[in-house]
Image: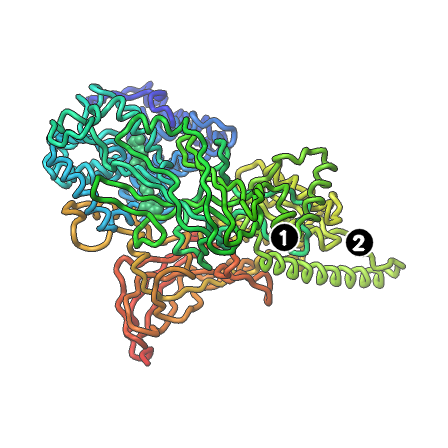
């Protein structure tokens, strides 16, 4: 964080009228002149210092110098950023904000720097402030929408909309307070809801803590709005840092918390509760004395949990976590070596890997197949500190699961029951109609191992590092124990991958690497992309087409010039075509281009391990290493990225990555496209050439529930919605349109076309009319893309095998439509951000 204390603080200034001071005036005017001169000669650092001096000495110049001062600040900040002088950069911004505390442009720009440095909370605070100062400031709005998802995670909306869960928590708290729990601490209060429940139930003292700054500020607002600001003490801190009597005057009789994630322990509940029992809670109640003095003992809501697991087959999980294809875009993948998603669990803790990911099983495209009955993986009592402490030293437990259906072992799915008290519990199971996702432990080692009914799957359950770890280790079949280890895969799984393994071993020997545990990590979306054969084949065909066209053109030109100069030159098109792939992350497209022959391809893959994979693949696919280069760009700006390799070479093709996995158009895509166009040789192309955006009217309550607290009713009687709904964003991302519960209210329609080869021709505003096919409430307009590589070849982001998800504009004020009615969509594109508003079209001509 920028060190606020590093800058000089100006105390209260007394507003005395100053006598004219010629020396001072002289200094001001000469400094102003110097500032302007330095600005002109692009010496921004010195210009900045001069401006600071002038504006501090003579605030009357603030209006006059504002534009130049901002410009100087931004330029100087850019320079400081590029040389890594981050503290200086933030000092400059803070000095600037002392002069112009309500300047939304400076606030927004500082937010952008903070965001890039990873200070999301602080960044969002700046965007929020800028937006409050000027609600119609599009840059700040766009930035705010981009960070809102991080600040206030979307599950807050779901949880507050989950009335069943709210009521159960409220009842359990009420009962505990009525039974004598008089002093309460809410750990991880979020919006403050559980703390307010305790207060409403009559608790004498209520404390709450929250580690996220944004959520803390939100909780303060909510508690004040509900008239409880004097009676709930909210602390912006992690419960682990709390002490008695510094933060709480004495130990409390009740801790309430919902700091649990889909894998139960991911939010650190075990550690928090161990700490709470040692430092913040009264001693637990011992024995069966129901009528004892509850106020002298401590307890926790939830009282405990039971964790369940089940083995599943699921293609959707598989294609995101391991390589499922032998060939991609005409390249054999045998020599790729082991590629892994970053989600991998073994009984031994490994900090570099996430042990699980989360999914809502019921919403996975293609569904899933249970291979075993659910089993109990763990039972935990949150009121027993010895048990909590014992978890990490517990022996690894071995569980045997009877396989009930044949299928490929793709993952272990995990959910739990949260026992709020003796009577009431919440379940996060896949069958429940709740807001919860399940934890997914994907299988890596057993590549495609097929389980058969009657097999027994041996799973190790452990909890060494306060994460619950589940790991399939072996299968018992016909009295034999088959370890699920990669070395035996090919032998038992019937997967004809032996050749691939041998090639991989050979490739590793060539590079002198040891094969053991040397794997390359790819993001889940990168893995899914690699598994998308259609995408790669499309590129392969489009590239081949372009190269052959360029060859013909080149031959014609040579023949022509040979004819003209009357020299006997044979048509010699052995010269190279240059292809640049600026895809984000791991991409095989450069290699596919290099495989066309006569192509020198440049890849922008940055990670060393991933570059090694590409080099191995080049060798094993007979692509000369000279035909593949790495476009190492260490400069931050995209201008650097898109410069050609040397003056006389122009690019034949530049491959741009235009859609993010979340379903949005990449930021600055159009700027990149214009720049790329300037770098093409004659006849050269940008891939893709154009993108067509499609959309459709739907009615989906789910989307509403995930984007804002719904309804006019207060949540459990508290006024929360207006506060948290400030963080509602108009576009929902990472949507699975194929499994979204919704009713289609229209056909799909073309919303607009982005022509990357002619950016001037693009619409910024467009009106689209479409007809409702049935009556309903339009709550959302999901949208997706057809990405045209050339006139004929396109890929759709809605495709089943795609690594892309979809996005949707959510209408917080749904639009009622009747069947046959015409709807007018006003579609806008501002700096790669799509916004859509929908209206009933009343013009008589349009009515059917
Ligand atoms: N996940 C729900 C709920 N915190 C996670 O900053 C539900 C998961 C979920 N504060 C699918 C669906 C759903 N001291 O604001 C957060 C967090 C804060 C703490 C102070 C601490 N020791 C902690 C630990 C966490 O507590 C709040 C809630 S924790 C996350 C709840 C729709 N998968």
Q: Quadrant of the N terminus?
A: top left
Q: What residue is pinned by disc 1?
A: 494
Q: Is residue 649 left or right of residue 139?
A: right
Q: Is residue 104 visible?
A: no
| Picture quadrant of ligand 1 | top left
Classify 330 as above or below 770.
above
**Quarter residue 235 falls in:** top left
Under circle 1, the secondary element is loop
User: Which residue is drawn at the image coordinates 52% and 49% (left, top)?
Assistant: 455
Where is 190 relative to 410, above or below?
above
- Which mark, by number, is residue 574? 2
Q: Nearer the viewer, residue 455 or 449?
A: 455
Vertical comparison of 710 with 84: above or below: below
Left or right of residue 192: residue 31: right
Q: Foreground residue, 562 or 403?
A: 403
Please tell me whether mark 2 sits on a helix, a strand or a loop: loop
- Is 77 on the left-hand or right-hand side of 388? right
The residue positioned 84% from the left and 60% from the top of the image is 562
Which mark is first along the chain, 1 or 2? 1
Q: Nearer the viewer, residue 492 or 749?
A: 492
In the depicted structure, whether residue 490 falls above or below residue 274: below
């Amino acid at each position: 964080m920028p060190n606020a204390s590093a800058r000089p603080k100006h105390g209260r200034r007394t507003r005395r009228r100053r006598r004219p001071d010629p020396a001072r005036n002289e200094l001001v005017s000469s400094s102003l002149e110097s500032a302007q001169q330095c600005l002109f000669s692009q010496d921004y650092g010195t210009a900045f210092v001069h401006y600071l001096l002038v504006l501090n000495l003579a605030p009357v110049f603030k209006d006059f110098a504002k534009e130049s001062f901002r410009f100087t600040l931004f330029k100087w900040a850019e320079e400081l950023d590029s040389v890594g002088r981050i503290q200086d950069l933030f000092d400059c911004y803070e000095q600037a904000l002392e002069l112009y505390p309500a300047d939304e442009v400076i606030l927004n720009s500082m937010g952008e720097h903070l965001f890039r440095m990873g200070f999301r909370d602080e960044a969002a605070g700046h965007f929020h402030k800028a937006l409050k100062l000027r609600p119609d400031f599009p840059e700040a709005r766009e930035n705010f929408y981009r960070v809102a998802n991080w600040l206030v995670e979307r599950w807050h909306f779901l949880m507050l909309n989950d009335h069943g869960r709210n009521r159960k928590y409220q009842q359990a708290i009420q009962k505990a307070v009525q039974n004598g729990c008089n002093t309460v601490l809410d750990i991880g209060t979020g919006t403050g809801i559980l703390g307010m429940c305790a207060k409403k139930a009559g608790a004498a003292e209520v404390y709450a803590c929250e580690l996220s700054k944004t959520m803390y500020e939100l909780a303060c607002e909510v508690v004040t709005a509900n008239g409880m600001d004097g009676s709930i003490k909210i602390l912006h801190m992690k419960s682990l840092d709390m002490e008695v009597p510094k933060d709480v005057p004495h130990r409390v009789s009740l801790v309430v918390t919902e700091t649990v994630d889909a894998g139960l322990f991911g939010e650190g509940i075990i550690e928090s509760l161990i700490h709470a029992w040692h430092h913040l809670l009264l001693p637990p109640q011992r024995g069966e004395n129901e009528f004892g003095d509850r106020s002298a003992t401590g307890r926790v809501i939830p009282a405990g949990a039971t964790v369940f697991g089940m083995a599943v087959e699921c293609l959707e999980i598989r294609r995101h976590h391991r390589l499922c294809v032998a060939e991609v875009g005409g390249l054999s993948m045998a020599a790729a070596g082991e590629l892994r998603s970053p989600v991998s669990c073994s009984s031994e803790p490994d900090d570099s890997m996430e042990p699980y990911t989360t999914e809502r099983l019921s919403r996975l495209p293609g569904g899933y197949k249970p291979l075993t009955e659910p089993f109990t993986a763990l039972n935990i009592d949150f009121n027993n500190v010895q048990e909590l402490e014992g978890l990490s030293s517990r022996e690894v437990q071995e569980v045997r699961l009877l396989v009930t259906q044949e299928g490929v072992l793709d993952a272990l799915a995990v959910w739990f029951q949260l026992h709020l008290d003796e009577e009431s519990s919440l379940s996060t199971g896949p069958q429940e109609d709740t807001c919860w996702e399940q934890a997914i432990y994907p299988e890596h080692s057993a590549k495609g191992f097929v389980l058969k009914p009657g097999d027994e799957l041996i799973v190790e359950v452990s909890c060494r590092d306060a994460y619950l770890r589940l790991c399939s280790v072996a299968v018992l079949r016909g009295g034999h124990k088959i370890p699920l280890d990669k070395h035996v895969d090919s032998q038992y799984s019937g997967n004809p991958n032996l050749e691939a393994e041998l090639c991989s071993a050979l490739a590793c020997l060539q590079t002198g690497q040891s094969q053991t545990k040397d794997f390359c990590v790819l993001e889940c979306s990168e893995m899914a992309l690699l598994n998308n054969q259609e995408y790669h084949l499309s590129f392969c065909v489009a590239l081949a087409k372009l190269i052959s066209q360029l060859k013909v053109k080149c031959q014609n030109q040579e023949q022509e010039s040979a004819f003209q100069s009357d020299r006997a030159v044979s048509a010699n098109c052995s010269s190279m075509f240059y292809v640049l792939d600026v895809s984000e992350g791991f991409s095989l497209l450069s290699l596919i281009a290099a495989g066309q022959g006569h192509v020198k391809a440049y890849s922008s893959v940055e990670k060393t391990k991933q570059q090694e994979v590409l080099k191995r693949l080049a060798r094993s696919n007979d692509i000369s290493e000279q035909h593949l280069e790495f476009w190492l760009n260490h400069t931050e700006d995209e201008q650097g990225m898109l410069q050609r390799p040397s003056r006389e070479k122009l690019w034949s093709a530049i491959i741009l990555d235009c859609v993010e996995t979340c379903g949005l158009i990449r930021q600055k895509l159009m700027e990149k496209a214009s720049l790329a166009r300037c770098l093409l040789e004659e006849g050269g192309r940008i891939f893709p050439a154009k993108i067509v955006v499609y959309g459709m009217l739907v009615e989906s309550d789910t989307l509403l529930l995930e984007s804002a607290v719904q309804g006019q009713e207060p949540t459990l009687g508290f006024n929360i919605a207006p506060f948290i709904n400030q963080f509602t964003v108009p576009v929902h991302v990472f949507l699975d349109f194929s499994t979204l519960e919704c009713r289609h209210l229209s056909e799909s329609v073309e919303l607009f076309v982005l022509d990357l080869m002619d950016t001037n021709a693009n619409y910024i505003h467009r009106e689209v009319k479409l007809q409702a096919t049935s009556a309903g409430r339009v709550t959302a307009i999901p949208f997706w893309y057809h990405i045209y590589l050339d006139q004929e070849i396109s890929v759709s982001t809605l495709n089943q095998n795609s690594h892309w998800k979809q996005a949707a504009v959510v209408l917080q004020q749904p639009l009622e439509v009747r069947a046959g009615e015409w709807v007018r969509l006003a579609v806008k594109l501002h700096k790669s951000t799509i916004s859509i508003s929908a209206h009933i079209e009343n013009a008589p001509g349009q009515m059917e």
